[in-house]
Image (spheres, grey):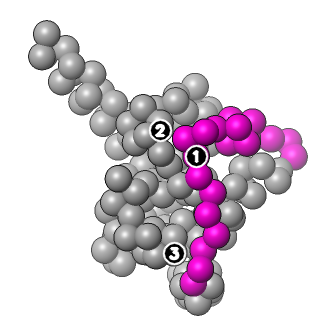
């Protein structure tokens, strides 16, 4: 399963001490370079900064199609992380894009990407737990 994440899913999960849900639910998560930079090149650090630098379950990739990124930035007015996350999801034919921002979600939907956000991740975890309990 190819899962791409924008910055918000990582920072929000880290802020509530649940970042470990990403490797538990998806095994591996891929982020574009812009998301990595938004998480690590900031002072003061944001939730998830130190974890992102050392996470073995996180892969950082460069977006090949700058044209898509520029269109999303100029026409849709998304931030660099959202632009690159959507572009990377399209390039890799991702199974899922983790994104919370309204405009980014709307554009990802318009482009045919399957999306979820913080609430969807937490609901999936709860569904998984209930499933395990009901099988006992």
Residue in the foreground of this view, choosing between 94 and 125: 94
Residue sitting at x 13%, y 10%: 136
Image x and y of residue 11, in percent: 62, 42
Query: Do the numbered discs 2 and 1 sit on residues whose CB atoms are within 8 Å?
Result: yes
| Numbered mark located on residue 58 in the image | 1
Rendered location of residue 38, percent (x, y)? 72, 56
Q: Quadrant of residue 83?
A: bottom right
- Which residue appears at 43% of the width and 54% of the height? 3
Residue 8 visible here: yes
Q: Residues within 10 Å of mark 1 (few under 14, many from 20)?
A: some
For the point 54% across and 66% down, which residue is it?
Answer: 85
Query: In screen coordinates, is 94 left or right of 127?
Result: right
Residue 55 in the magenta stretch? The answer is: yes
In front of the other: label 2 or label 1?
A: 1
The location of residue 69, given as percent across then percent down, is 59, 81
Q: Which residues are magenta?
A: 43-65
Residue 67 part of the magenta segment: no
What is the number of the mark on residue 87? 3
Per the model, the C-alpha gap separating discs 2 and 1 is 9 Å
Of all residues, the one furthest to the front in this rendering is 56
Mark 2 residue element: helix
Q: Which residue in the structure is indicated by mark 2?
A: 22
Question: How far is disc 3 from disc 2 in space, using C-alphas?
Answer: 21 Å
Figure quadrant of residue 111? bottom left
Eyeballing the image, is 106 above or below 7? below
Tell me whether the residue at label 3 lies in contact with that at label 1, contact meaning CB atoms closer than 8 angstroms: no
């Amino acid at each position: 399963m190819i899962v791409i994440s924008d910055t918000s899913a990582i920072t929000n999960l880290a802020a509530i001490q649940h970042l470990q849900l990403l490797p538990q639910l998806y095994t591996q998560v891929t982020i574009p370079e812009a998301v990595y930079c938004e998480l690590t090149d900031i002072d003061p650090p944001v939730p998830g900064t130190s974890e992102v630098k050392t996470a073995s379950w996180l892969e950082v990739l460069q977006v090949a199609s700058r044209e898509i990124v520029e269109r999303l930035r100029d026409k849709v007015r998304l931030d660099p992380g959202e632009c690159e996350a959507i572009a990377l999801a399209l390039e890799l034919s991702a199974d899922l894009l983790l994104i919370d921002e309204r405009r980014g979600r709307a554009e990802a939907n318009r482009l045919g990407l399957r999306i979820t956000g913080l609430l969807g991740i937490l609901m999936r975890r709860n569904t998984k737990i209930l499933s395990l309990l009901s099988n006992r």
